[in-house]
């Protein structure tokens, strides 16, 4: 049961990240980053950094399908960096300019992951 839940988390990562990673490396056709719904200015350094991080998470998620408990640390990394992003970027942005200024897809997916992954991580580490 636990391995199935972990595989579902890795599968969700894969579904989200395949198009996002592709857009980070191929979709540099304008002044904004496509993965952030055009609400974050483009920067080759930003795109490369975020794209590399997300590609690494994608690779670990693919490996996690085969070894779900071994790769649970990647879920913890996601909770940490997504929590920081929500608190340090999205929170102040929304307070200053309202929800319309925030990239909805990224923000919503980050909130869901930050809410759900800690329970999976706890289950995985508490399991015998």
Image (cartoon, rainbow, N blue to C red):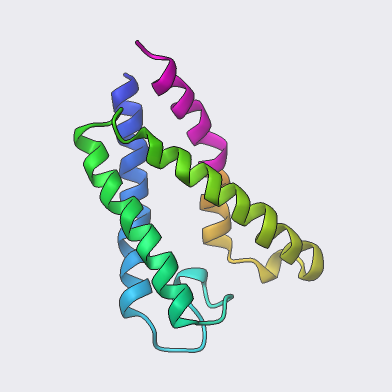
How many numbered discs, if any? 0
66 on left or right of 4: left
Judging depth in this view, the residue of 108 and 50 nearest the camera is: 50
Query: What's the magenta region?
Result: 113-128
Judge whether 26 appears above or below 5 on screen.
Answer: below
Membership of 97 in magenta stretch: no
Return the x and y of residue 33 as percentages of the image width and height: 48, 77
Q: Which residue is located at x 75 percent, y 62 percent?
A: 92
In the image, 53 versus 68, the foreground residue is 53
Outermost residue on the left side: it is: 66
Q: Is residue 89 above or below residue 39?
A: above
Q: Residue at x 26, y 51 (%)?
A: 59
Answer with left or right where residue 5 lies relative to residue 120: left
Q: Which quadrant holds the N terminus? A: top left
Residue at left offset 39%, top offset 36%: 73
Location of residue 89 by image quarter: bottom right
Specify the farthest residue to the top. 128
Q: Return the x and y of residue 115 as percentages of the image width and height.
A: 57, 37
- Which residue occupies 32% across, 55% down? 56
* Residue extending furthest toward the right: 96
**Is 60 above or below relative to 22?**
above
Instruction: Tell me the chief SS of the magenta region.
Output: helix
Residue 64 in percent (x, y) is at 26, 38
Tell me the quarter of the image containing the C terminus. top left
Seen as rendered, the residue at the extreme bottom is 30
Residue 108, image x and y in percent? 56, 53
């Amino acid at each position: 049961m636990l391995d199935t839940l972990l595989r579902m988390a890795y599968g969700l990562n894969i579904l989200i990240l395949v198009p996002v990673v592709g857009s980070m490396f191929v979709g540099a056709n304008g002044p904004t980053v496509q993965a952030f719904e055009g609400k974050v200015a483009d920067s080759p350094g930003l795109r490369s950094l975020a794209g590399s991080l997300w590609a690494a998470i994608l690779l670990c998620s693919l490996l996690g399908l085969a070894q779900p408990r071994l790769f649970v640390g990647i879920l913890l990394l996601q909770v940490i960096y997504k929590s920081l992003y929500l608190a340090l970027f999205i929170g102040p942005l929304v307070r200053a300019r309202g929800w319309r200024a925030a990239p909805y897809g990224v923000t919503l997916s980050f909130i869901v992951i930050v809410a759900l992954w800690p329970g999976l991580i706890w289950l995985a580490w508490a399991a015998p």
